Image: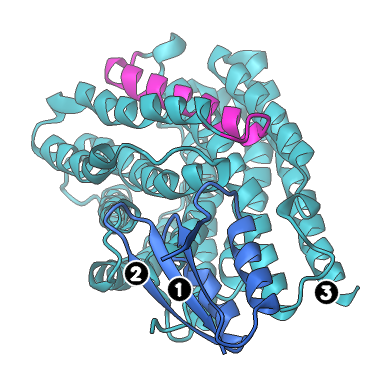
């Protein structure tokens, strides 16, 4: 008999998911305050602050919520006092991101050091615990293995980020440009890319009712990406090869989406559009230029707005109503008025968010007024997402009292 | 062994079908379900009901869940 206490308390992942749009809202506001400065250089403090509000605040909250939830569902990894532990991680992450965004925007050493401390003290112990538990889990599926590798990438990203803070605030004698390149690589292709791949292996067939991924590919893809990133620590010249894992993810993904039994589900084309942008960004990144379509700000923004935003939208539109339904069904064992997830998060909501994500991804690469429009779209998207999440939670509560 | 394959259904349909079967089953009735992976979230729901179950993970990643109504 398997230990039955595997599900996380609903509040643990939901807290991360509901906080994410607030960071997106802040990112939109920050961008609209200084659009030309943000677009001018990837090294501008405002651009760095905005990048971290998006990558750590928005994407980071969703990724941590998904990591904890998927590790519990797929590998049975759950802390003894999951509610309290989840709250501590959430608090540490929000404090760290707030300090980091403020520290970068105002270039304040004390704030940056506080951010590095808060994020290291939060994320490193969490990553260590998760890695050990994932390795000890009886589950040996590609998602569980992939989560363990992505956790290692998270550790590397945090350590590299902390080293960068030391260089910026204490003048530590470390190679800044090399550290920065590796920090970006491990954060995007490592932590985000490997986590996304691991989660996609489970959620795409599950929610979009597709055939399973090719078995050999999903066993090798994440470990292969990890080895490639390790090799790039020594030989950065290998960077053009990063397009290979991206293609190995996106090309089979498109084929699976074509075979999905949920033909009209908007999540299908959100995954497809996000995949296309990830492939383009990883394909073009080695040939970065000072301006134009190959500018680092354009490519970085496209990774976030064109790649991650639509895919995370698709994930949130499925995972959140599923979690709410699970919780509802636990509290109400006999079947009640809530029969399917569409009652909590209608597909038309996903369609609205999808259109906004599409507009943001299409506007961003053209810079100037178009990019500013993308910033405005982010505000609308964040407000809509906040409202939708709140409404979905209210509907779940209301169904309990019917 | 008669196995109900729930792999092709979108969530929460597989869990809902198992719970609906269990709530209607007679004591000692047995059913086996195939799911895309070990359904950990289901187990919390099963503990709320008079039943016992075991799970076997298959080589292809799917899981067989055998449930006995008590």
Residue under the point 47% across and 53% down? A63
Which quadrant of the rendered structure holds the C terminus of chain A? bottom right
Q: Which chain is cyan?
A: A
Crowdedness of circle 2 by 10 Å Cα count: few (<14), some, many (20+)?
few
| Callout 3 secondary element | helix
Q: Nearer the viewer, mark 1 or mark 3?
A: 1
Question: Answer yes or no: do the residues labelled 1 and 2 have beta carbons within 8 Å?
Answer: yes
Q: Nearer the viewer, residue A353 or A139?
A: A139
Q: Which chain is blue?
A: B
Which residue, given by chain and number where applicable, does mark 2 sit on? B56
Which residue, given by chain and number where applicable, does mark 3 sit on? A400
Crowdedness of circle 3 by 10 Å Cα count: few (<14), some, many (20+)?
some
Q: Which residues are magenta?
A: A261-289
Which quadrant of the rendered structure holds the N terminus of chain A? bottom left
* Same subunit, tags 2 and 3: no
- Disc on res. B57: none
Which residue, given by chain and number where applicable, does mark 1 sit on? B66
Does A385 sit left or right of A316 as displayed?
A: right
Does A72 sit left or right of B6 as displayed?
A: left
**Quarter of image, res A337:** bottom right
Q: CA distance from mark 1 to mark 3?
A: 29 Å
């Amino acid at each position: 008999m398997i230990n039955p206490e595997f599900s996380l308390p609903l509040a643990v992942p939901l807290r991360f998911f509901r906080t994410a749009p607030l960071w997106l809202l802040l990112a939109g506001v920050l961008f609209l305050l200084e659009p030309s400065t943000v677009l001018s250089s990837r090294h501008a403090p405002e651009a760095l602050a905005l990048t971290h509000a998006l990558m750590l605040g928005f994407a980071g909250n969703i990724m941590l919520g998904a990591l904890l939830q998927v590790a519990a569902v797929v590998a049975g990894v759950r802390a003894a006092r999951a509610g309290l532990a989840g709250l501590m991680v959430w608090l540490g992450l929000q404090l760290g991101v707030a300090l980091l965004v403020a520290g970068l925007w105002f270039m304040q050493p004390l704030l940056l050091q506080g951010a590095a401390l808060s994020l290291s003290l939060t994320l490193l112990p969490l990553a260590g615990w998760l890695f050990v538990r994932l390795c000890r889990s009886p589950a040996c599926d590609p998602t569980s293995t992939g989560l363990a590798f992505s956790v290692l990438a998270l550790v590397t990203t945090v350590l590299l980020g902390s080293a960068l803070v030391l260089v910026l605030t204490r003048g530590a004698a470390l190679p800044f440009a090399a550290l920065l390149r590796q920090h970006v690589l491990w954060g995007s292709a490592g932590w985000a890319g490997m986590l996304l791949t691991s989660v996609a292996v489970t959620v795409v067939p599950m929610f979009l009712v597709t055939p399973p991924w090719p078995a050999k590919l999903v066993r090798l893809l994440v470990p292969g990406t990890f080895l490639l990133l390790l090799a790039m620590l020594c030989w950065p010249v290998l960077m053009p090869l990063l397009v290979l894992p991206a293609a190995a993810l996106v090309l089979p993904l498109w084929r699976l989406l074509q075979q999905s039994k949920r033909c009209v589900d908007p999540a299908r084309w959100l995954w497809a559009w996000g995949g296309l942008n990830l492939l383009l960004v990883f394909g073009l990144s080695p040939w970065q230029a000072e301006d134009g379509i190959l500018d680092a700000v354009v490519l970085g923004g496209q990774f976030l707005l064109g790649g991650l935003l639509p895919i995370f939208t698709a994930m949130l539109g499925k995972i959140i109503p599923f979690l709410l339904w699970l919780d509802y069904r636990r509290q109400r064992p006999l079947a009640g008025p809530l029969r399917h997830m569409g009652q909590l998060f209608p597909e038309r909501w996903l369609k609205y968010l999808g259109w906004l994500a599409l507009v943001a991804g299409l506007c961003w690469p053209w810079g100037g007024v178009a990019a500013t429009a993308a910033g405005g779209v982010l505000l609308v998207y964040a407000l809509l997402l906040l409202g939708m999440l709140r409404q979905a939670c209210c509907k779940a509560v209301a169904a309990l009292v019917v | 062994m008669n196995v109900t394959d729930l792999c092709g259904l979108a969530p929460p349909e597989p869990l809902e079908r198992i719970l609906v079967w269990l709530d209607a089953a007679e004591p000692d009735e047995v059913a086996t379900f195939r799911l895309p992976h070990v359904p950990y979230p289901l187990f919390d729901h099963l503990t709320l009901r008079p039943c016992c179950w075991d799970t076997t993970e298959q080589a292809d990643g799917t899981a067989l869940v055998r449930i006995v109504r008590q």
